[in-house]
Image: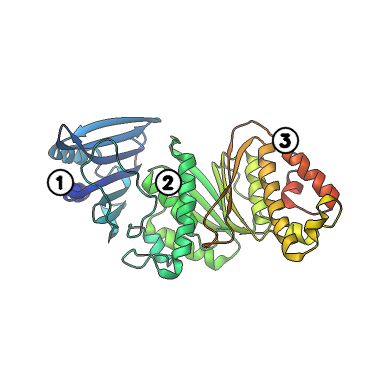
Amino acid sequence: MAKITQELALALPTLGKAVFSQPTEKGQAQKVEIRPLLLKGERRYQAERFQDNKAFHQNFTEELLCAWAAENLEGRYRQVLLLTDTESRQYILKRDGSYKKTGGAATVPRPVGAQGHNREKDYILREGENIPALVDLGVFTKDFQIVRSKYDKFKQINRFVELVDQSLRDERAETIRILDFGCGKSYLTFILYYYFAVRRGMKTEIIGYDLKADVVQRCSEIAARCGYDGLRFEVADVTRDRLADTKIDMVVTLHACDTATDYALAYAVQHGVKYIFSVPCCQHEVNLSIRQGGELDLLLEHGIIKERVSALLTDSIRAAVPEDAGYAVDVIEFIDFEHSPKNLMLRARYTGRRKSAGRARAEALREQYGFQQSLLKLIENM
């Protein structure tokens, strides 16, 4: 019995879930998930194979599962995740056909093991889960516990991925391509890659753009150590440089500063990107350019109120423009205010149904109050 199958066999008594993802050859199932369940009071294991947007199920005894896995799974998937009652382990297929274990970590106790078809929902990220990138980024300690000073950051990226999961839970595509505008230290970028490539077993490509060459180099090194072949980082000014011209499925921003958010939204709208998840930051542009001119003058007389009104106006415009372009848009609370004052998320999905009244009203306000707003300018000819 080869090594990865041996690891699976040893994990079976306390197995919560095993995920085999990123097949090595065309024609294989895109992902295989193995879970325990009870059938007529006896412990069995169900293998769920995802292929051609369909799910196929097969139930095994422990002995038959090990034999089936040795024949059909060993060496045929680039990434393997084993979750048990007490441990999380991740393996990456090496060129010589063996698997490299990226580490093992104790997990937070949770109700797993043999269970019926009504299973308790897993959290997206858990303290103690084997996510090596979070160790390199300083969010987890070496034993995969949250670093106290990074608790708010952990809450932010966890919440972001939960909202992505809500929107894409039923997505059956085999591949996904994502652009992260202004990725910075790339906490979110790495977690999105982990979520799609490891947890969901999709062929994943993510490009992270940032201005700082040293940050890009460090993130590239971490991606290489984790075996994340589909994750790359590039030095780019998203307001000036030519960006990806391949088909992109999702654009994300997490606190991309000031007008960088507008450039991300303009890119998404102009390229017909299916999903947008954007948490804005530092909305200074309108505040610096708006002048009195009508019924809202009362809101512009005091600096702190003017600043807040300008930020809300900016994000309202950012919601209206995608709606005009055929997106269904939600503006939702991203995270509790105590964890971050930048707590709004714009979440959008392309439907083709246009809603033009908002953009027209925004343009009328721009004319009346004389402010500058980059997104309105960038999409003027659409």
Q: Residue at x 44, y 35 (%)?
A: 170
Q: In terms of secondary structure, where does tag 1 sit?
A: loop
Mark 2: amino acid: Phe
Q: Answer with left or right where residue 9 lies relative to residue 354.
A: left
Q: Position of residue 347 (x, y in %)?
A: 57, 45
Counting residues from the start of the chain, the first of labels 1 and 2 encountered is 1
- Where 92 sits versus 353, above or below? below
Mark 1: amino acid: Met
Q: CA distance from mark 1 to mark 2?
A: 29 Å
The quadrant of the rendering that contains the C terminus is top right
Q: Residue at x 30, y 54 (%)?
A: 90
Q: Residues within 10 Å of mark 3 (few under 14, many from 20)?
A: some
Q: Residues within 10 Å of mark 1 (few under 14, many from 20)?
A: few
Q: Answer with left or right where residue 234 lies relative to residue 240.
A: left
Q: Which residue is mark 3?
A: 356
Mark 3: amino acid: Ser
> In the image, which disc is placed on residue 1?
1
